[in-house]
Image (cartoon, rainbow, N blue to C red):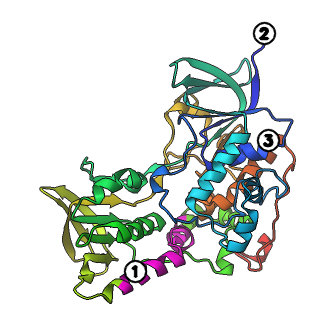
Amino acid sequence: MLELIYDIIGIGIGPFNLGLAALLDEVVELQCIFFDAKESFDWHPGLMIDGARMQVPFYADFVTLANPCSKFSYLNFLKAKKRLFRFAIHEKYFPTRKEYNEYCLWVVSQLHNLQFGKTCVGIFYSHKRSCYGIQVKDNRTGKTECFWARHIIIGTGTVPSIPEAANIKHPLLFHSSQYLDKKGELLAQDSVVIVGSGQSAAEIFNDLMSTVPKGTKLSWFTRSKRFSPMDYSKFALEMASPDYIDHFYRLGKDQKRATLAGQDNLFKGINFSLIDEIYDKLFERSLGENVCINDFGLFANSELVNISKLESFILEFRNPETNISFQHETSAVILATGYKNIVPEFLKGIEDLILWNENNFYDVQKDYSITKDKTIFAQNADLFSHGFNSADLGLGPYRNAIIINTILGKEHFSMETGIAFQSFGSSEYR
């Protein structure tokens, strides 16, 4: 009996590959299956802080910007949960993280080609079959099975980025992705430091301001020049579009890096409402009698240089503007230092087929393929090729539509272009 050859196998089921699976549900001519090593879908469980909101609006779901008629839209989710009227009345168009995770689980429950608890352990290419062999281990039984596919979509996500200065292993020195798991221990400490500049750092600082016992010293350090809000102005939002992706992709490699270096406020900033909330708490605290407002400290221009551990953690910082170094002592350290891409080990067997750049990472092509024959694609690996929108959940449907259209060899999903009033390059780009 001939073994089934899938048109697409997705490895990793995070939001981007889950969105791909949702869009593919209507593409009947493609047979697809997705695997993930986790036992179930769980999106950033360590950061499901009460009240924490997404940085994209509700319509930046898995499908709407590619196919607003899809049954997997966020509005259809609300209708199914009998929340649509309340949502409309509430007028909060940026869902909470918990609501978004619930939406993801709702989509997962309706797709039958998602297999969790299955780890990809290797990939090889079969010239005889003209397709890839994907070796998948069942975490429960330990059995490894081979699946065949003409195309592979890598959606294994990113991993926590830990600064070199944080070279100590200790349960009270950890990445922000573990925050809720560690919160109970943090509340028993007399001092806590958060290192980082973005949304996660702000959410954790805000949450701890309301929950640490009186007298606990809470400090937030960032190497950024200021605690910057995300730019939600209309012309900035035009840059979260296929138009800007096209422009950025045309730039030279050196220019791309230089451009990205000046765009932190477009993809690394903090929700303006959250900054307001933190400031309001600080202001209200300053009005009380017999309170020490220095219990809560915010320090910009503070680059982490080293961490040592005696009875407490000793953090050494340097101010890039003054070149002055200083130390800070604390009982616990939270590293809200973001995430980074890595190349999965399972690609070792086919690394000679993959296009690599000078940094030994995928050389992502315009259509998000990473092989010459356009048979392997990568999700959320295009920061330095396509621009700051790489990790933007709102642009996930666009990238997935391009991937599907490329595999089909036709425009199944028609994506809008020419949406920006502004021109990002010369007129010939228009």
Choose top left, top right, bottom left or bottom right for residue 53: bottom right
In front: mark 2 or mark 1?
1
Residue type highlighted by circle 2: Met
Reply yes or no: does residue 260 show up in magenta: yes
Which span is picked out in magenta?
A: 257-284
Choose top left, top right, bottom left or bottom right for residue 298: bottom left
- Tell me the quadrant of the picture where the N terminus can be found: top right
Q: Distance between the residues labelled 3 and 2?
A: 27 Å
In front: mark 1 or mark 3?
1
Q: With respect to residue 422, does 195 lie above or below?
A: above
Q: On the picture, is 252 further left or further right than 141?
A: right
Kind of element beneath mark 1: helix
Residue found 76% across the figure and 21% down from its top: 4
In front: mark 3 or mark 2?
3
**Main SS type for the magenta part?**
helix
Residue found 65% across the figure and 65% down from its top: 248
Circle 3 is placed at which residue position? 25
